Amino acid sequence: MSGSHHHDHHDGHHHDHGKPHSHPHSPPAPDDDDGYDRYEVLLQTAIRELLDEKGIISAEDLHRQIDYQDSLTPAIGGKIVAKAWTEPDFKKKLLADPLKAINESFELDITTPLDLVVLENTPQVHNVVVCTLCSCYPRMLLGIPPAWYKSLDYRSRVVNEPRKVLAEFGTVLPDDVEVRVSDSTADLRFLVLPNRPAGTDGMTQVQLAALVSRDSMIGTAVVPAPKK
Amino acid sequence: MNAIPPRTGHALAPGATVRILKQPPEAHCRTPYYLRGAKGEIAEVRGLFRDPSLLAFHKPGLPMRILYRVKFKQVDVWPNYAGSKNDTVVADIYEHWIEAIAGETK
Amino acid sequence: MERKVNDLGGQPAGPVCLDEHPSTLHEKRVDALQKILSGSKLGVFTSDAMRRAIESNTAEDYKGMLYYDKWIRAVRDLIIEQQLVTAKEIDDRVAELRVRLAKTGKL
């Protein structure tokens, strides 16, 4: 819901990787909901009201859609990864026909993305996903994409200097590993199946799913071995 | 994927060496600039899709086009690629932006 | 113009900012409006049309505008294009909302 504090994007923030940097191209952070006087907030309100009055989209329709959106989180992807890690048969089906395997195993009825592709990380290949042309993302499995995925910087640089970009996320791959960037230019949507880390033998699917980060399913992170 | 019936007399098979055409973009274009003119290979045949350049203008997007996943070596795409020579980029490109390069082998 | 404003692959750019914020209600509403309008039930416009509308910005606007601002402006363009509403209806309502806001402090 609302209530995020207004924050200036350009100072006072810190990053886990501790590297200070400037934001030459970033637009300022969005206002929170108190920014009523912004044109685009007025525009959204105007459109919402007009479409409701015209019987096209009711307030209820909108609430239902927002609630549904809120229910989509990376936890869904995490469950899929954990199951693939522990059940070789499911993993095989997942790689062959991801949507079918997911719908059958989780008793879901996901109809979109119709063309889901699961990209398996191996010791030889590390996958990372981008949409250089816009922000295509497997929202059904991961929720809405993070701001960085939609940023001009990520979209520009991960195709031509993926290792540098991955390093900014704290992810470094040896040279003999192929870093394979998938540019989501059409209707296909991609979920990276990260490598299962060492030190996870005997863990339940619930425990494993908790280890799987959103970023590891985009490919900017790996799943680290759990701390003892 | 199921076999795709050939539409234009040929369908490109996985492994085929191809080049992305260098031509002006459509009014709505899904072939990235950085790949135009690049040499790659067909990684996967993904089937028939409506043409997004037409869907973008409320048209039905017909005739449907074959969509291919095309893989490129990064060193073939970027003149000064600084990563590993093993690195690749894969993009989803429609058939009418691809030409087979005859006589070249991997 | 060979390279469109949105065609960013390989363009010079800066470090990736990793800051995240929870979606605001405004952002969620924009997302939901766009999703319903482009969904199979209403089918007012396609996602391709949304992209095309966003790509029609100048390079400066494309780079400078907030993500969801580009979206709501594209929704506006497309619902006018598809004749669900007129530009005048939208402009008049926005003006009304400014008055409402000034009078009551909220929308």
Image (cartoon, rainbow, N blue to C red):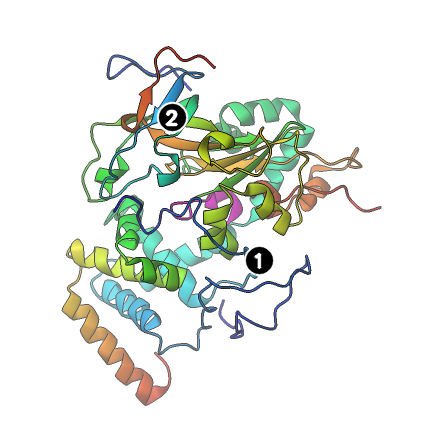
Question: Residue at position x 42%, y 38% from top?
Answer: A113
Q: Over which residues does the magenta segment extend?
A: A132-143
- Please state which amino acid type lies under the numbered disc 1: Leu
Numbered disc 2: what chain? Answer: B
Q: Which residue is mark 1?
A: C18
Q: Position of residue A37 (x, y in %)?
A: 35, 78
Q: Which residue is mark 2?
A: B68
Pick out the residue farthest to the right.
Answer: A228
Pick out the residue farthest to the bottom.
Answer: C103
Numbered disc 1: what chain? Answer: C
SS for tag 2? strand
Question: Residue at position x 52%, y 69% from top?
Answer: A9
Q: Position of residue B49 (x, y in %)?
A: 30, 30
Question: Residue at position x 25%, y 17% from top?
Answer: B7
Question: Can marks 1 and 2 be said to lie on one chain?
Answer: no
Q: Circle 2: is it few (<14), some (14-19), or many (20+) Cα within 10 Å?
A: many
Q: Position of residue B63 (x, y in %)?
A: 21, 27
Please tell me whether residue A49 is drawn above or below residue B63 in the rendered image. Answer: below
Answer with left or right where residue C45 lies relative to residue A4. Answer: left
Question: Would you say residue A137 sits in the magenta stretch?
Answer: yes
Instruction: For residue B53, say whether it is visible.
Output: yes
Q: Circle 1: is it few (<14), some (14-19), or many (20+) Cα within 10 Å?
A: some
Residue B100 falls in which quadrant of the image? top left
Q: Position of residue A40 (x, y in %)?
A: 33, 69
Question: Would you say residue B100 sits in the magenta stretch?
Answer: no
Please tell me whether residue C65 is drawn above or below residue B94 in the rendered image. Answer: below
- Please state which amino acid type lies under the numbered disc 2: Tyr
- What is the CA distance from the residue labelled 1 to the residue labelled 2? 32 Å
Answer with left or right where residue B106 lies relative to residue C38. Answer: right
SS for tag 1? loop
Q: Nearer the viewer, residue B85 or A154?
A: B85
Give the overall secondary structure of the magenta segment: loop
